Amino acid sequence: MIIDGKDQILGRMASVAAKKLLEGEQVVIVNAEEVVITGNRQYFFDLYAKRAQFKDIANPLRGSFFPKRSDRIVRRSIRGMLPWKKDKGRQAYKRLKVYVGIPEDLVGKEFVRFNDADISKLRTKKFIRVKDISNSLGGRV
């Protein structure tokens, strides 16, 4: 299954992708930088900045393990919806691929879009794109 992430709501898209991964399907997400997160912009800038700067109390040199690139932020969101501590969750996570833009080998193939996760279903106009969060963290898109 190849999912087009352009104008898709992150949580709704990630939950469907996680279910497909647990069923044993290979899931590929393209245009990860165009995925949106609904809510207050400043709240999410602060939240992700705090996560990215988190260090271990016992060893402050042990750096942050939260991603800064947009494709990895989407990948990490899907990981949070999988049973990561069990083997089936880790095996499902290996079947997930997330790309910024559309890779050359996927050009011309049919993409899946979820109507429930589309940005046009929002009642509010408060949202932020993952690429904006990535840029604020210093990531490369």
Image (cartoon, helix red, strand yellow):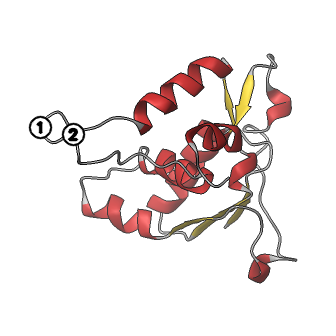
Q: Please rate how many residues cluster around mark 1, counting C-alpha atoms within 10 Å: few if below 14, some from 14 to 19, many from 20.
A: few
Find residue 110 and report its image quarter: bottom right
- Residue 122 higher or lower than 113, as above or below: above
Residue beneath label 2, please?
60
Residue beneath label 1, please?
58
Residue, far bottom: 105
Closest to the observer, 109 or 19: 109
For the residues labelled 2 and 1, the Cα–Cα distance comes to 6 Å
- Residue 132 higher or lower than 124, as above or below: below
Residue, far front: 61
- Residue 49 higher or lower than 18, as above or below: above
Q: Secondary structure at mark 1?
A: loop
Closest to the observer, 14 or 49: 49
Q: Secondary structure at mark 2?
A: loop
Q: Residue 25, how many percent across, how many down?
A: 54, 69
**Horizontal side of residue 109 vs 17, given as left or right:** right
**Horizontal side of residue 49 vs 56, given as left or right:** right
